[in-house]
Image (tube, rainbow, N blue to C red):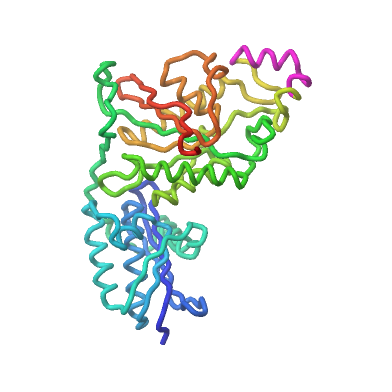
């Protein structure tokens, strides 16, 4: 009989709430041998409910094996912090699951909880996806989890809403706009659009600093215990930046193609001077006319239309909530331009640093308010 085991657990929801499932694996702590696997489709539930369900299943499997000491490893910071007693459990749907986990845990000699990066939880993540995939296969599943999920309306107590000054009505959708960290292309100040380049070591440090700052901000973890949605451009430099924040919040990264950077076409990888020398007339046109595209690329007018659709999608899906958007310099400038109701000249006059944070709110009555621009205090 194995005396000490590792329990790795995960859960996911395609929609949050949406079709959900969990996965859990029990391993021998000394050899890494897989002793048990569990996965199950839950019906409609949130990410956090699925993650807690995975924890309960993993602990139950370890108990069945007669294990004495359990090391729980999960990529959900929320579950780890709450089960460790450092965070309160406010969401009514999570409290009974946490109580069930504690009841099982009481039967062990010792249980510890450790947060791990998502990449190190791939076994449980794979099992959770197997469970969610079974939803469309006709596999038998339990009844959907019934939840009352009140939408958190967390505001920053030390900030005054601009609505009283502007006449804006309704609860705004707040977009926290985070630019990605440094890449090799940005070091050399080269046009970097659709080229899929990763963060440098310094860029990863910038992402970690931004994540630490955001994790301490009011409103990123709601009163219901749910982290704010995190939506990223599909390129690797933004996904790496977004994942650093997701790891800090215990959330998950979704992507939206409308948040991708401008397609610079044949100027991709060139410096400003190289592009100007290669296509002098076209480059001058591009700097003065938002309808003028780079050769084989995308005009700023086209970017504006694309990002406008992405903004409508975000406001429709996350109406009245706080959303972290991780993107690139042009899409972020475009969202700020929409918030300011400004012309295209803003694109050429506004500077945004790498890993900078900006905030814009969009109200349901069409009003908007830009609350912050190019804040890099977390990098100092």
Q: Is residue 93 above or below residue 219?
A: below
Question: Where on the picture, by quarter, is residue 286?
Answer: top right
Look at 27% across and 21% down and name the residue there: 163
Q: Is residue 286 magenta?
A: yes
- Measured as percent of width and height from the top left, residue 30 is found at 49, 79
Furthest-front residue in view?
380
Question: Where on the picture, by quarter, is residue 341?
Answer: top left
Q: Which residues are magenta?
A: 275-290
Q: Is residue 134 left or right of residue 98?
A: right
Look at 48% across and 57% down and name the residue there: 117
- Measured as percent of width and height from the top left, residue 101 is found at 28, 67
Furthest-bottom residue in view?
1
Q: Is residue 71 left or right of residue 239?
A: left
Question: Where on the picture, by quarter, is residue 191?
Answer: top right
Q: Is residue 103 above or below residue 149?
A: below
Q: Main secondary structure of the magenta part?
A: helix
Number of disc labels: 0
Q: Is residue 289 magenta?
A: yes
- Measured as percent of width and height from the top left, residue 118 is found at 48, 57
Q: Is residue 331 above or below residue 26?
A: above
Q: Is residue 54 left or right of residue 183?
A: left
- Measured as percent of width and height from the top left, residue 365 is found at 30, 20
| Quadrant, the N terminus | bottom left
Furthest-right residue in view?
278
Q: Is residue 45 above or below residue 169?
A: below
């Amino acid at each position: 009989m194995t005396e000490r085991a590792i329990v790795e657990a995960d859960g996911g929801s395609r929609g949050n709430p949406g079709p959900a499932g969990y996965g859990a694996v029990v391993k021998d702590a000394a050899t890494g041998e897989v002793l048990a696997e569990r996965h199950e489709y839950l019906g409609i539930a949130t990410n956090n409910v699925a993650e807690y369900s995975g924890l309960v299943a993993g602990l139950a499997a370890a108990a069945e094996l007669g294990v004495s000491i359990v090391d729980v490893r999960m990529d959900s910071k929320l579950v780890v912090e709450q089960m460790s007693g450092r965070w309160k459990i406010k969401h009514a749907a999570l409290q009974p699951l946490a109580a069930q986990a504690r009841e099982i845990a009481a039967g062990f000699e010792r249980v510890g909880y450790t947060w791990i990066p998502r990449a190190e939880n791939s076994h449980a993540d794979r099992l959770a996806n197997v469970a969610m995939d079974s939803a469309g296969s006709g596999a038998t599943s339990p009844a959907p989890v019934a939840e009352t999920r009140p939408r958190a309306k967390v505001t920053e107590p030390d900030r005054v809403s601009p609505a009283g000054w502007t006449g804006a009505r309704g609860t705004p959708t707040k977009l926290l706009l985070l630019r990605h960290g440094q890449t090799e292309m940005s070091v050399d100040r080269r046009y970097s659009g659709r080229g899929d380049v990763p963060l440098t070591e310094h860029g990863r440090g910038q992402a970690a600093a931004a994540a630490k700052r955001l994790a301490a901000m009011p409103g990123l973890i709601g009163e219901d215990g749910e982290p704010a949605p995190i939506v990223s451009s599909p390129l690797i430099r933004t996904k790496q930046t977004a994942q650093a924040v997701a790891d800090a919040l215990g959330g998950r990264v979704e992507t939206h193609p409308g948040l991708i950077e401008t397609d610079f076409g044949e100027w991709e990888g060139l410096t400003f001077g190289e592009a100007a020398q290669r296509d002098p007339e076209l480059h001058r046109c591009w700097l003065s006319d938002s309808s003028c595209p780079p050769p084989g690329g995308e005009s700023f007018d086209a970017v504006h239309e694309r990002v406008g659709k992405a903004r409508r999608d975000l406001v429709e899906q996350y109406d009245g909530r706080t959303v972290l958007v991780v993107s690139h310099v042009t899409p972020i400038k475009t969202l700020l331009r929409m918030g300011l109701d400004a012309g295209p000249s803003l694109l050429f006059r506004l500077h945004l640093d790498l890993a900078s944070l900006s905030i814009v709110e969009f109200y349901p009555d069409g009003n908007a308010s830009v609350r912050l621009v190019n804040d890099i205090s977390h990098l100092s």
